[in-house]
Amino acid sequence: MESSLAMNTLIFLGVAIIMVPLARKFGLSSVIGYILGGIIIGPYVLRLTGNNVNDIMHASEFGVIMLLFIVGLELEPRKFWEMRKKIMGLGLTQMLLTILLLFLVFISVGWRIDKAIAVAMCFALSSTAIVLQTLQEKNNFKTTAGEASFSTLLFQDISVIPILAILPIIANYKAKHHDNEIQILIQKLPQWLQAGTVILGVALLILLGRYVFVPFLRYVSKSGMAELLTASSLFLVIGVSELMVVIGLSPALGAFLAGVMLANSEFRHELEAQINPFKGLLLAVFFVSVGSTINFNIIQKDPLFIFSTVFAVLAVKFLVLYTIGKFYKIDTPQSFFYAFALSQVGEFAFVLINYASDLYLLSPELNAQLMAVTAITMCITPILLILNDKFITPKFIREIPEEEHDYNILDSDVTQKKIIIVGFGHFGSTVGRLLKANKISATVLDRDSDRVKLLRSYGFKVYYGDATRIPILRAAGIEDAEILVLCLDDSDDNMFIAELVREHYPEVKIFVRAKNRIDAYEYLNNGINHIYRETLGTAVDMAVDVLHETGMRKYAARRLGQRFMAIDKASVRKLAKMTEDQDVTLFSTKEILQREEELLAYDNLNFDTKNWEGSSSTEEEDEEESQD
């Protein structure tokens, strides 16, 4: 069935919408749902896709790039630098051992040396998309296995560059002027300089991140237009990816490094919220396209070769990864997860296998077979992880974990994002300063880029973002937050955010700023009990000082002020229930005001009577008054 690119995309999205909820209902990974959907609509079942499947796959591979950009935003440069030993140790060991063992396997079945080396290098890579998606779904990023997987994937992305340079050498192939494949800056450099492109790319991204990206985003944010920030986010990711292709770096690696460079900026959460929807959409289409490109005719012609190769690749990679995990003292269940998660062949193999075919290292028939092997291993991995979770891991996890291991959950960032403050003007900054003075950290969101820049220079953890959008709140950590403090000037925005959070995250405690009684009534009637009227405290403080200037003792004036505030808060809660009937409200207001007057008069009378009778003030009162 021939169809347009737009129609294919529509079909891909439709099958994803149907299959993923079905897969999740049966406790399966969303990746399985996507791939099964792709198989169903592919040219070998319902035949709903045309010749544009490969075009859709290449376009949707950009979802992997966006995914790595977001992962980079979550990883500060300091943390990335601390991981350098893991990246080099785990990644380099995995690549070398996997290539060596796969090379020996292929040589043993009679392959040529150049062909065996080329395929071994292609198959040594794992799927960044599948692994990171799985870690995200299972919330395993902060486990030991999660960090090991991430470190290994980063090194594999770096390895794509030398593999691209090595393949033509193995094939003894020289590019002709009319060749259009992989025409990048790296090929115009001498062989001994090509390895230096990694250093060049990293240095360039550091300079861009510090002196270009952040000032550019500040300039755009001043327009106050959300669509421009979305365009800027996409512009940055696409621009960095294309720049890395020109230099010779993997675009996914470039996007990750760009994310790391922006991880400490005030736009971190805003960028994450803007990119996330596009990332999720493109990844969904990518996984569906993987399923739709499995060539069942090729599998049917030689199933023994296809599945024996699949088994050999999975077995070799599992053995290598599990051994590395144990060598680096990762405990047994985490080593199993690490080995199963990275045992498949990655999406970069699609590009490298085609490139090897263009260099005449692989025949067209073998190219199609290896493509099928790659896709099948990607389909099998989520199933292996389910088997690991259900049958292997439970055998090793004790009922009561040891305190020093605690299932290998890392301490980094576990206690972050417990408090979120929205709005850091004169009201919110008072709250934030008091928390900071008591060494209580909070994530702050504000829409004034100049204010954000200033406050960050003073050490506050402030980010630029519009908290009326749920993606921004998610990026700021609302899912982990215990307290949300709303301090915006706009009461409507405070109410909107409060209702949004109560709907999606009812367990979060909300503390909200109210400008007056009317705001307070609305909050109370919507189930929000922690209300702070911005004029009440200062007005009472003023009245207390006036009373003191008239001759009243300071302690007595303060006592009256505190009593007034308590009565006023109680009256607001009572009146909030009566706002629908204005007549009743008016009567109740008069009644409560009269009660306030009576109580204050009674309190004042008792105090004066006590002093009139000659009883002296207490030592605590005298001490407090002398301090004033």
Image (tube, grey):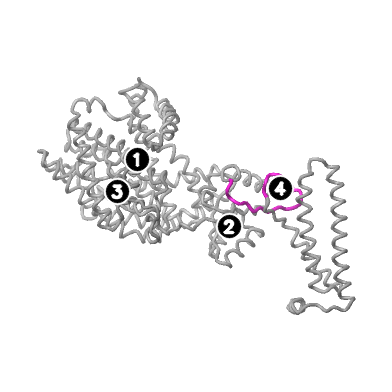
- Residue occupied by mark 1: 386
- Residue occupied by mark 3: 336
Observer-nearest of 209 and 595: 595
- Residue occupied by mark 2: 450
**Which one is earlier in the sequence, the residue at label 1 or at label 3?**
3
Q: CA distance from mark 3 to mark 4?
A: 52 Å
**Which one is earlier in the sequence, the residue at label 3 or at label 2?**
3
Quick check: marks 1 and 2 in contact, CB under 8 Å? no
Query: Mark 4 against mark 1, which lies toward the viewer?
Result: 1
Magenta region: 506-528
The amino acid sitting under disc 3 is: Phe
Side (left or right) of 238 relative to 181: right
Observer-nearest of 315 and 301: 315
Side (left or right) of 353 relative to 207: left
The total number of labels drawn is 4
Which residue is located at x 25 percent, y 57 percent?
327
- Residue occupied by mark 4: 524
Quick check: marks 2 and 4 in contact, CB under 8 Å? no
Q: CA distance from mark 4 to mark 1?
A: 46 Å
The amino acid sitting under disc 4 is: Leu
Spot occupied by residue 605 in the image (x, y as percentages of width and height): 88, 68
